[in-house]
Amino acid sequence: MRTQARRSKVTAKSVALNQDRSGIMRAFYLTVLTAMLIVAQAMVAQARESFSDLADKVSPAVVNITTSTVVAQGAGPSPIVPEGSPFEDFFREFRDRSGQGDRPRRTSALGSGFVISEDGYVVTNNHVIESADEIIIEFFSGKELEAEVVGTDPKTDIALLKVEAEEPLPYVSFGDSDTARVGDWVMAMGNPLGQGFSVSAGIVSARNRALSGTYDDYIQTDAAINRGNSGGPLFNMDAQVIGVNTAILSPTGGSIGIGFSMASNVVTRVVDQLKEYGETRRGWLGVRIQDVTDDVAEAMGLEEVRGALVTDVPEGPAAEAGMESGDVILSFDGQKVDDTRGLVRQVGNTQVGKTVRVVVFREGKTQTLKVTLGRREAAEAAVPAAQPGGEPEASESALLGMTVSTLTEELRGQLDLGDEATGLVVTDVDNLSEAYEKGLRAGDLITEAGQQKVNSIGDFEDRIADAEDAGRKSILLLVRRAGEPRFVALPLDSED
């Protein structure tokens, strides 16, 4: 009996102890959760305070821009009225009363910008001030100054203005846009929809976005950007400008959280050149290029699918250095080339007149060329040099899913080809062939096969045989359409 009573006491004590432990654990977890909530609220509060401090710090350097332009009265939209309609006289009288006939009228536009130096240099978008004959800068304090255009760059949509002030102006500095990470906090400032100084915050949504320009390098953000924000700054949390707000993606015309700011590392190079020369001076290599695809890489024997494939070398720096059509540019001035977009930016960012080393892949091995860059803006459209070769006898054959013919005078006239043109003309393409899938069509001119010129059916057949003997699965063709060259890799199993 005593043993049973003792066991009952021990059991009761154990139950009580477990209950105490459960209560302690619940209290502990509750304390931890409360602490985490407090920390999260503190972080949010701190973030909000940081935006307030940041806005106070940079506001004096952000400006509203108002432009005005004189346009002809008839340049604007007007109602469309059928000739002889009874409303024709009414609309003519209404237009004459309101617009005084066809007299010129002045229109206004709004945008944003920011001061980058105490002596009055202001950055904005080119489209904000384009064609303007008067530009007024309004500061956060309400002070207004008239601005002059120092220079513009339509390719990056950047413009540099200058105002004259009696005292040093507050300004902001550029940051390194390459250090911006997806998810970082950013703040946009500007003059949305003409409402005056306005602040919006968000994060970096993506980087290295390309819209339509050759030198595009946009930061995508969900910070609200609307019409009127164009030309305004995108700040990081260190009060540095890492982008110039330029465009939005929206089906409605208003912000839906997809805005684009030109990266500051692009802007600073443009601004430096505009300040020094009043214009941009970009490097120019003088080649036409296309991306390297999987089948092109296989056809050429490249180990990696990268680089820029040269489709044409008109008269210019690259031609003078010995570059040839069919070369694959793997390295430019010591930097690896991944694709055509990267090469264009690398060349454009290089000083005009600089001699650079360019590594190309040619006929199964690499070769280094020394190229002295020209200036892109001054480059004239070059015409490919004439290629020697007599008129081959007319012949036609079905090869690789295409019917090809030697180039005759009749075909020259039909295709409007000059006397310098050589190659084989595609006269028909099988709709079920790989050639059709790759975009080849009747009227295309094949000038090279296997990176060697072809002037006859026999040349073409020899190039196919050479590729097969070398164990290639495809052959690379250089095709011209309306004078524009491109490379196409066709599988050899298309051969009948």
Image (cartoon, rainbow, N blue to C red):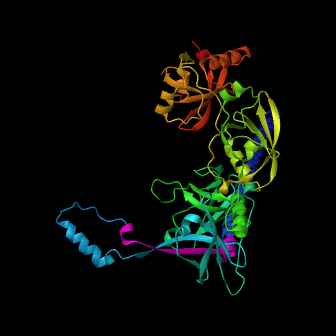
> Among all residues in the image, which is located at the extreme front?
390
In the displayed structure, 139 sits above or below 223; it is below
Q: In terms of depth relative to the viewer, which is nearer, 225 or 104?
A: 104
Residue 46 image-quadrant placement: bottom right
Residue at position x 49%, y 36% from top? 416
Residue at position x 77%, y 47% from top? 21
Residue at position x 32%, y 78% from top? 100
User: Quadrant where the N terminus lies?
Assistant: top right
Residue 224 image-quadrant placement: bottom right
Residue 217 lies, in percent from the top left, at 66, 53
| Residue 38 seen | no
Residue 448 lies, in percent from the top left, at 64, 27
Residue 451 lies, in percent from the top left, at 69, 27
- Does 475 appear in magenta? no
User: Quadrant where the C terminus lies?
Assistant: top right
The magenta segment is: 54-75
Residue 365 image-quadrant placement: top right
Q: In terms of depth relative to the viewer, which is nearer, 458 or 438?
A: 458
Q: In terms of depth relative to the viewer, which is nearer, 35 or 331?
A: 331
Q: In terms of depth relative to the viewer, which is nearer, 233 or 156?
A: 156
In the displayed structure, 491 sits above or below 328; it is above
- Does 66 appear in magenta? yes
* Position of residue 309 in the picture relative to residue 336 (left or right): left
* Position of residue 271 in the picture relative to residue 213 (left or right): right
* Position of residue 170 in the picture relative to residue 113 (left or right): right
Residue 289 lies, in percent from the top left, at 66, 40
In the displayed structure, 246 sits above or below 363; it is below
